[in-house]
Image (spheres, grey):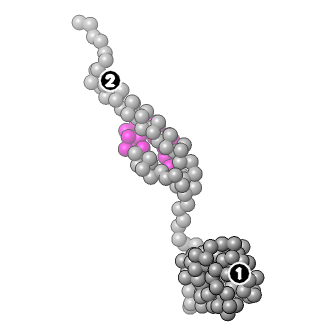
Amino acid sequence: MDLSNNLRTTRKQAGLSQTEVAQRLNITRQAISQWENGKSYPDIDNLKLLSDVYGFDFADIVNDNVKLQQKPGLPEKQNEEKQTEQPTNTPAEESLILLLLSCILFPIAPMGIIIAPFIIWRNKRTNRFWRLILLIAICALIYNIYVLSAGFSDFLGFGTTSYK
């Protein structure tokens, strides 16, 4: 039995409704419903309060849930390896990569025009340094356009005066 079914079963055994439990925990009834349907999970503090309300041991629920998450037939070490193999890309890592990339754009004139719009598009408000990334990427884009137009006009000889 998983955590959601355990919560539902113990609540019913205690003879409580979702509303009564929600009032005792000072949360919404919808949160209790989501926990019991497996759409979300209670945090540690709420699990501790639930164990007090329902009268069960907190450690038993947590240990049962950990055992259920392990795949049957595999030793525990292999299960841990499988869980750690998945790469994680957190917003903090992404924001640092975007910040570094936008700083590198200044000396590389032609690439800045191509990469800066991508950085602006990829930058999200959830990133840690989103304003700084946006400012640097826009400045890099303007600078790269200026350098490219100055080089192009110098190549074509615009703005030079010649006396013959």
Q: Position of residue 17 (x, y in %)?
A: 64, 85
Pick the quarter of the image with the N terminus: bottom right
Q: Amino acid at mark 2?
A: Asp
**Residue occupied by mark 2:** 154
Which is more N-terminal, label 1 or label 2?
1
Instruction: Classify 10 Å Cα crowding around label 2: few (below 14), some (14-19), many (20 and above).
Output: few
Is 142 displayed left or right of 31 in the figure?
left
- Magenta residues, dominant SS class: helix
Q: Is residue 14 above or below residue 86?
A: below
Label ID, residue 50? 1
Residue at 72% x, 86% y: name it.
54
Is 6 displayed left or right of 115 in the figure?
right
Q: Position of residue 160 (x, y in %)?
A: 31, 15
Q: Amino acid at mark 1?
A: Leu
Disc 2 versus disc 1: nearer the observer: 1
Q: Which residues are magenta?
A: 98-116
Helix, strand or loop under label 1: helix
